[in-house]
């Protein structure tokens, strides 16, 4: 008599049960500013991919006083998904990306933290790939990269692609960090590692992400990389302007002189 073949649904349930026994929990930090159109979509996608994979997670929304009503949308989403999945930790005004992560970490109950943009530039389908690679290599952090393998950028004009490539090349030349994408902001960290790195970083804004990798290398943390597709925002306006580019150049020279 042949053994009974396991159905696909039974296999998925067994796999999910096995994953839940690992005890790992993933806190996803979503800093927001004027993202009322994007927030429902990104949260739905996160839940779809992580629920299907059977991971234990929470989504922490850190809204910096968005005048477009982003926080009101987040409150409605919390009613739909539940307070255990959607955690709201708003602030009164825009205070910077680095402080948003610090604020979010204080309320994170997971032992791993995912940071990503809320504007649909980062697709949640890559999060399970981050988790898989982290477990395989026990990496301290896993970073999404646009510059190796099948990674890439879509929706940018030639000028913005040139600025991005140029900034990354210059950073590689001056700092030699040993990672291919310094300015990306889609990453998975061990919580203790992220706390240590944030405490040591002095940069703000977009340069903050770059310094995190540099400090990680200084502390001999292990870094894994997953090729990702970066897509320019669908709704809203880009927050990258001339002042951010100037600040990037100044901070890059500062890091070159001090690290």
Image: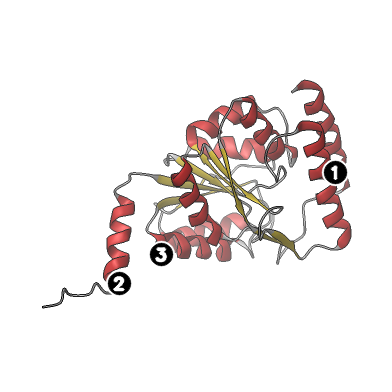
- Looking at the image, is 234 positioned above or below residue 118? below
Q: Decide if residue 87 is in sight here.
A: no
Task: Report how far apart the C-alphas of labels 2 and 3 lie in the structure.
Answer: 11 Å
In terms of sequence position, does the residue under pointer 1 or pointer 2 come before the other? 2
Q: Residue at x 31, y 60 (%)?
A: 15
CA gap, disc 3 to disc 1? 39 Å
Residue 88, percent from left and from top: 51, 48
Name the quadrant containing residue 259: top right
The percent coordinates of residue 192 (x first, y second) are: 49, 31
Q: Residues within 10 Å of mark 1 (few under 14, many from 20)?
A: some
Q: Left or right: 147 with respect to 87?
A: right
Disc sitting over residue 192 in the figure:
none
Residue 234: give x, y in percent of width and height: 70, 67
Q: CA distance from mark 1 to mark 2?
A: 50 Å
Q: Residue furthest left?
A: 1
Q: Secondary structure at mark 2?
A: helix
User: The N terminus lies in which quarter of the figure?
Assistant: bottom left
Question: Which residue does the numbered mark 2 point to in the structure image?
Answer: 9
Q: Is residue 64 left or right of residue 203?
A: left
Residue 222's quadrant in the figure?
top right
Q: Earlier in the sequence, mark 2 or mark 3?
A: 2
Which residue is label 3 attached to? 52
Location of residue 113 in the rendering, given as x and y in whole percent from the top left corner: 50, 43
Q: Is residue 224 left or right of residue 2?
A: right
Q: In this orientation, which residue lies closer to the viewer: 125 or 2?
A: 2
The image shows residue 77, relative to residue 21, as above or below, that is: below
Element class at badge 3: helix
**What label sits on residue 245 in the rendered view?**
1
Q: Are marks 3 and 1 in contact (CB under 8 Å)?
A: no
Label 2: how many residues lie within 10 Å, few (<14), some (14-19) or many (20+)? few
């Amino acid at each position: 008599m042949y053994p009974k073949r396991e159905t696909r649904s039974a296999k998925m349930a067994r796999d999910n049960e096995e994953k839940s026994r690992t005890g790992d929990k993933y806190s996803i930090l979503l800093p927001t500013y004027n993202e009322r159109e994007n927030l429902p979509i990104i949260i739905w996608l996160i839940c779809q991919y992580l629920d299907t994979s059977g991971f234990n997670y929470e989504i922490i929304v850190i809204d910096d006083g968005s005048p477009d009503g982003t926080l009101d949308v987040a409150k409605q989403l919390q009613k739909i998904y539940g307070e255990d999945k959607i955690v709201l930790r708003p602030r009164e005004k825009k205070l910077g990306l680095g402080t948003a992560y610090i604020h979010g970490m204080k309320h994170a109950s997971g032992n791993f933290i995912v940071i990503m943009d809320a504007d649909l530039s980062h697709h949640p389908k890559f999060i399970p790939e981050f988790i898989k690679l982290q477990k395989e290599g026990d990496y301290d952090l896993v970073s999404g990269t646009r510059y190796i393998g099948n990674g890439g950028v879509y929706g940018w004009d030639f000028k913005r692609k040139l600025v991005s490539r140029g900034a990354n090349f210059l950073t590689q030349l001056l700092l030699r960090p040993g990672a291919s994408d310094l300015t990306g902001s889609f990453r998975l960290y061990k919580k203790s590692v992220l706390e240590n790195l944030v405490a040591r970083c002095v940069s703000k804004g977009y340069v903050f992400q770059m310094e995190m990798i540099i400090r990680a290398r200084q502390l001999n943390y292990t870094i894994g990389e997953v090729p990702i597709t970066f897509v320019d925002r669908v709704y809203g306006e880009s927050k990258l302007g001339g002042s951010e580019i100037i600040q990037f150049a100044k901070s890059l020279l500062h890091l070159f002189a001090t690290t």
